[in-house]
Image (spheres, grey):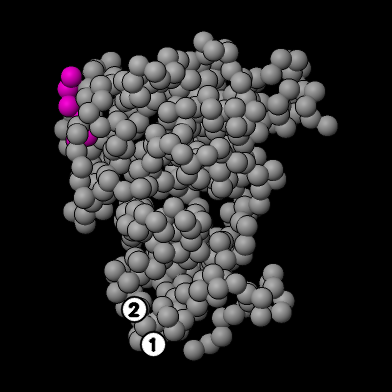
């Protein structure tokens, strides 16, 4: 979706402000939100892209106004509601008012923690050879799906070069639509800064995206 | 339903000072626990792991080893996940890690314009600025401006290479080893390797910069 989350290249947000000796969490509730999101994701079999899509659907004025972990809270609440695991009345009551719904992978227990503290594996066996090879010129498609995609707007329609082949991976666009993994070849595609931002761009800039094969046309 | 408020009021002993957000989060946890979906102890363990086990110290050990061991450096650049997996203490690091090396002619910077993708298994959870609107919007267009926000100025002819983490590949920047560290061992070198230097918004510290 062409949402506000897709913010590469937008102006006006001001300087980047880093915090010296930043704590991992700024308040205890942030850690609880992260932990609940991870735990419920593992218990329910929600994929990373389903969860991203839930956060992308936060209304833009809210998305820009709230903190990172507030977005996660809104995202996990939406996922719980959409999957019928909690209802709106329970959310406002802050208590279980109805019996639990079945979880795809069962309740999340202490013994499950080590498993989720390792990043997931998204590589899959390819069903066809890679369409592009290193050095190929490609043009990112001009697509505007209303659903989740990982092709950023600033790259759409732009000409780039395949720099690396990263293997065959779960395709986020399909997963977020509930259509299964539909693995696709993944490429590092590099763009000249002037191709992306025009003649005035920094001539020393090159930007790469990780692009799934369906995002690319030969050029 | 059993009480599960065991973690209540850790940081606000009075309880009455709890912010609305804290109350909402606690209400959600109460609901999920009463439903039997999650064990509060499991949530505690996730938080504990995020606060202690993962962090930039892991990435710094990888970079320090790459600085002193040319065979490891080559293996790391060829296949980051495979190379890191050979270091026993980092066996929890996941797949699809790509290490990219800075040189006098190329400087690498990592961003996630679409959300907050970050090699948390190697660097810990991302700092607030990495997830912030200014960083996500500007880095792909004006990386030198972003670098100047971090007090970093590079020569005008250095190529700036921005890696937008739009899939599950994760990027680790190998900063340039500072001059004057030829006789330093891995543990000493690791003290020079900051989190920001492994994201590309900073450089490794010079020997004179550490106490």
Q: Residue A124 in the image: x percent, y percent?
A: 28, 41
Which chain does tag 2 point to?
A: A
Residue at 39% x, 18% y is A200
Residue segment shown in magenta: A214-219
Relative to residue B55, is residue A181 drawn left or right?
left
| Helix, strand or loop under label 2 | loop
Quick one: B45 or B104, which is closer to the camera?
B104
Neighbour tally class for label 1: few under 14, some 14-19, many 20 plus, Cα within 10 Å: some
Q: CA distance from mark 2 to mark 1?
A: 9 Å
- Above or below, B125 against A155 in this view is below
- Above or below, A164 against B171 in this view is above
Please indicate, yes or no, whether residue B94 appears anywhere in the rendered image.
no
From the image, tell me which residue sits under label 2.
A87
Rendering quarter of residue A107:
bottom left
Which chain does tag 1 point to?
A: A
From the image, tell me which residue sits under label 1.
A97
Judged from this view, the residue extending furthest toward the right is B211
């Amino acid at each position: 979706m062409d949402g506000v989350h897709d913010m590469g290249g937008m102006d006006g947000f001001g300087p980047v402000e880093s915090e010296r000796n930043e704590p991992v969490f700024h308040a205890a509730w942030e850690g609880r939100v992260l932990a609940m999101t991870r735990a419920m994701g593992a218990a329910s079999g929600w994929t990373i892209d389903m969860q991203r899509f839930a956060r992308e659907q936060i209304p833009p004025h809210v998305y820009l106004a709230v903190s990172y972990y507030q977005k996660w809270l809104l995202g996990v609440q939406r996922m719980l509601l959409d999957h019928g695991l909690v209802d709106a009345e329970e959310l406002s009551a802050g208590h279980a008012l109805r019996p639990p719904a079945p979880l795809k992978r069962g309740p999340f227990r202490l013994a499950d923690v080590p498993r989720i503290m390792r990043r997931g594996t998204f590589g899959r066996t390819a069903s066809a050879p890679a369409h592009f090879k290193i050095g190929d010129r490609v043009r990112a498609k001009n697509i505007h799906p209303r659903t989740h995609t990982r092709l950023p707007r600033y790259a759409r329609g732009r000409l780039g070069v395949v720099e690396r082949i990263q293997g065959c991976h779960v395709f986020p666009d399909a997963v977020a639509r509930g259509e299964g993994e539909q693995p696709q070849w993944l490429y590092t595609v590099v763009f000249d800064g002037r191709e992306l931002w025009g003649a005035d761009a920094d001539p020393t800039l090159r930007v790469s995206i990780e692009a799934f094969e369906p995002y690319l046309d030969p050029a | 339903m059993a009480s599960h408020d065991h973690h209540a009021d850790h940081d606000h002993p009075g309880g009455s000072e709890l912010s609305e957000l804290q109350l909402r989060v606690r209400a959600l946890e109460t609901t999920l626990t009463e439903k039997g979906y999650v064990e509060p102890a499991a949530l505690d363990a996730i938080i504990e792991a995020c606060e202690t086990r993962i962090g930039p110290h892991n990435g710094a050990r990888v970079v320090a080893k790459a600085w002193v061991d040319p065979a490891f450096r080559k293996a790391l650049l060829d296949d980051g996940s495979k190379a890191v997996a050979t270091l026993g203490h980092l066996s929890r690091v996941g797949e699809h890690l790509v290490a990219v090396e800075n040189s006098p002619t190329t400087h690498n910077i990592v961003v996630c314009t679409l959300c907050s993708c970050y090699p948390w298994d190697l660097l810990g959870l991302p700092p607030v600025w990495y997830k912030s609107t200014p960083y996500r919007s500007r880095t792909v267009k004006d990386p030198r401006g972003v670098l100047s926000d971090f007090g970093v100025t590079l020569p005008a002819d250095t190529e700036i290479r921005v890696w937008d983490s739009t899939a599950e590949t994760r990027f680790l920047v190998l900063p340039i080893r500072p001059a004057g560290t030829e006789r330093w061992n891995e543990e000493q070198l690791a003290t020079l390797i900051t989190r920001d230097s492994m994201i590309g918004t900073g450089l490794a510290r010079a020997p004179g910069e550490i106490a």
